[in-house]
Image (cartoon, helix red, strand yellow):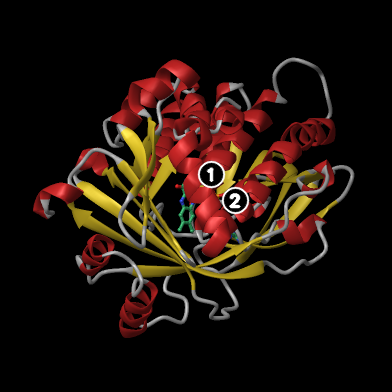
């Protein structure tokens, strides 16, 4: 019988393969894409994620490709005034033992993939799409579409679903439950930093808050590019999450112009610096309610498959990396059954993940507030400063 079978070779799947391998656990990883290619743009990795990557021996490789912002500056999107500032860089290393990194998703993915290859504990199978599966008390049978277009079956001790927001593995052990459309969109672009006006070449991370929108920007690729994300409450209903869902380039440009109409000229200038914005419709699920939401019998979920969340705490990949470490820990020591290990993993994770999911939803309201709520938020940021912006409960976890 096959050992543990991982479905999905994104950040979560590769992190799990690596972490399990470091604990001497062999895995087979099946990815539907014919080649490992990561699309997307930049992501922020809090010290909670960076410390796990550091423990896996990846910090040096990451730092060669990532960026360490000096501070987080929060601005009012309407008038461009500074609201608050949180020193990061060395302050974070001293406080949390690991840096805050900003990185292109493809770079993080490549570092993980190289480490998985070098470790040699994982058999990688590309071009295999999970179609179906049945779990019983002895094993899990899965059916796959292979690269030749044939249906093949595999039997394994357990299946770990790291297959993202539209998880097929979820359907093996859980009742169907629709994803929740937020009506929010993320528009993302990358700008070459050297070509930008001096004001946009700083080494900071910027967060601009305005009614029904916010903007985040930070350098990636060792500082070569500025990653810009505009998050907007647009309200258009779409059925599935994904890049450019039901969006033409003209629609995207119109939406962006509409979104930034009430913003200060500096922010409008930034948004007009690129003609290559891509849109992503944002979906999530309600916060987990029990450990059973993450593992049942011989099937467990991790990353977006388990807990898709709004990116308003910048922690989706961070939680996938934490999941991977927690999962692997269950294979240290004690002689337990695979079901017991998966149950212990879910027990260790569900409450923290639920809190992060809930905070991400709450941030959507706080970041996009107007009127009295925005006034209170801005006052708290001005007077509370770094103490209000730091999140020890999250970063030290
Ligand atoms: C706008 C935006 C900004 C974000 N910013 C941040 C941030 O700053 N920080 C952060 O930590 N996170 C951020 N995230 C979230 C982060 O990108 C995701 O949480 C993370 O990438 C999820 O990784 P995953 O491995 O769980 O899933 P995925 O990356 O979706 O990987 C799933 C993999 O499974 C494969 N797969 C799917 N179905 C099958 C099947 N049937 N058979 C075989 N293979 C299959 C897919 O091809 C894919 O390779 C952001 C997200 C968005 C949308």
Whether residue 260 is visible: yes
Note whether 38 is above or below 386 in the view shown. below
Res. 241 image quadrant: bottom right
Q: Position of residue 91 (x, y in %)?
A: 39, 21
* Residue at left offset 63%, top offset 53%: 362
Q: Please give the name of the residue rendered at 77% of the width and 58% of the height, measured from the top-left corner.
A: 172
Query: Tag 2: Cα neighbours inside 10 Å, few (<14), some, or many (≥20)?
Result: many
Q: Quadrant of residue 324?
A: top right
Determine if the C-beta at disc 1 is less than 8 A from ligand 1.
yes
* Residue located 50% across and 33% down the image: 390
Q: Name the residue under label 2.
A: 360
Q: Of helix, strand and loop, which one carries label 2? A: helix
Q: Classify the position of the N terminus by image quarter.
A: top right
Position of residue 83 measured from the top left corner of the image (x, y, whole percent): 39, 45
Q: Is mark 1 on a helix, strand or loop?
A: loop
Taking depth in this image into account, of 133 and 237 the one nearest to the observer is 237
Judge left or right: residue 65 versus residue 84.
left
Question: Where does residue 391 sit, x and y in percent of width and height?
Answer: 55, 33
Q: Can residue 1 be seen in this view?
A: no
Q: Name the residue under label 1.
A: 315
The C terminus lies in which quarter of the figure? Answer: top right
Q: Nearer the viewer, residue 341 or 352?
A: 352
Q: Are the residues tagged 1 and 2 within 8 Å (C-beta)?
A: yes
| Residue depth check, mark 1 versus mark 2: number of the one nearer the observer | 2
Q: Which residue lies furthest to the right in this view?
A: 137
Q: In the depicted view, which residue is nearer to us: 248 or 146? A: 248
Mark 1, other Cα within 10 Å: few <14 / some 14–19 / many ≥20:
many
Vertical arrangement, residue 255 with respect to residue 82, above or below: below
User: Can you tell me whether the CB of the residue at mark 2 lies under 8 Å from the nearest atom of ligand 1?
Assistant: no
Total numbered labels: 2
What distance separates the C-alpha of mark 1 from that of mark 2? 9 Å
Q: Position of residue 76 (x, y in %)?
A: 38, 55
């Amino acid at each position: 019988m096959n050992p543990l079978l991982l479905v999905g070779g994104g950040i979560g799947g590769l992190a799990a393969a690596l972490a399990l391998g470091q604990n001497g656990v062999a895995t087979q990883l099946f990815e539907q894409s014919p080649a490992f290619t990561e699309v997307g743009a930049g992501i922020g990795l809090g010290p909670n994620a960076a410390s796990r990557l550091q423990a896996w021996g990846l910090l040096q490789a990451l730092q060669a490709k990532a960026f360490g912002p000096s501070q987080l500056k929060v601005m009012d999107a309407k008038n461009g005034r500074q609201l608050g500032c949180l020193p990061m860089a060395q302050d974070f290393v001293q406080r949390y033992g690991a840096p805050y990194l900003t990185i292109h998703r493809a770079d993080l993915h490549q570092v993980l993939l190289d480490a998985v290859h070098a470790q040699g504990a994982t058999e990688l199978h590309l071009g295999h799409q999970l179609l179906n599966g049945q779990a019983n008390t002895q094993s899990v049978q899965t059916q796959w579409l292979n690269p030749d277009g044939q249906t093949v079956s595999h039997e394994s001790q357990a299946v770990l679903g790291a297959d993202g927001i539209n998880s097929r593995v979820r359907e093996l052990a859980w009742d169907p439950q629709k994803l929740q459309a937020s009506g929010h969109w993320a528009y993302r672009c990358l700008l070459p930093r050297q070509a930008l006006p001096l004001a946009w070449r700083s080494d900071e991370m910027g967060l601009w808050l305005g009614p029904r929108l916010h903007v985040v920007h930070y350098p990636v690729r060792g500082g070569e590019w500025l990653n810009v994300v505009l998050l907007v409450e647009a309200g258009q209903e779409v059925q599935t999450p994904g890049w450019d869902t039901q969006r033409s380039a003209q629609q995207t440009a119109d939406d962006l112009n509409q979104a930034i109409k009430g913003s200060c000229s500096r922010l409008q200038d930034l948004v007009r610096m690129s003609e290559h914005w891509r849109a992503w419709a944002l979906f999530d699920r309600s916060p987990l309610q029990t450990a059973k939401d993450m593992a049942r019998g011989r099937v467990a979920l991790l990353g977006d498959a388990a807990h898709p969340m709004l990116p308003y705490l910048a922690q989706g990949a961070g939680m996938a990396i934490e999941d991977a470490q927690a999962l692997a820990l269950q294979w240290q020591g004690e002689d337990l059954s695979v079901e017991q290990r998966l149950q212990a993993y879910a027990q260790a994770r569900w409450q923290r993940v639920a809190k992060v999911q809930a905070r991400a939803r709450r941030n959507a309201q706080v970041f996009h507030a107007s009127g009295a709520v925005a006034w209170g938020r801005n006052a708290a940021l001005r007077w509370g400063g770094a103490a209000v912006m730091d999140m020890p409960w999250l970063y030290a976890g």
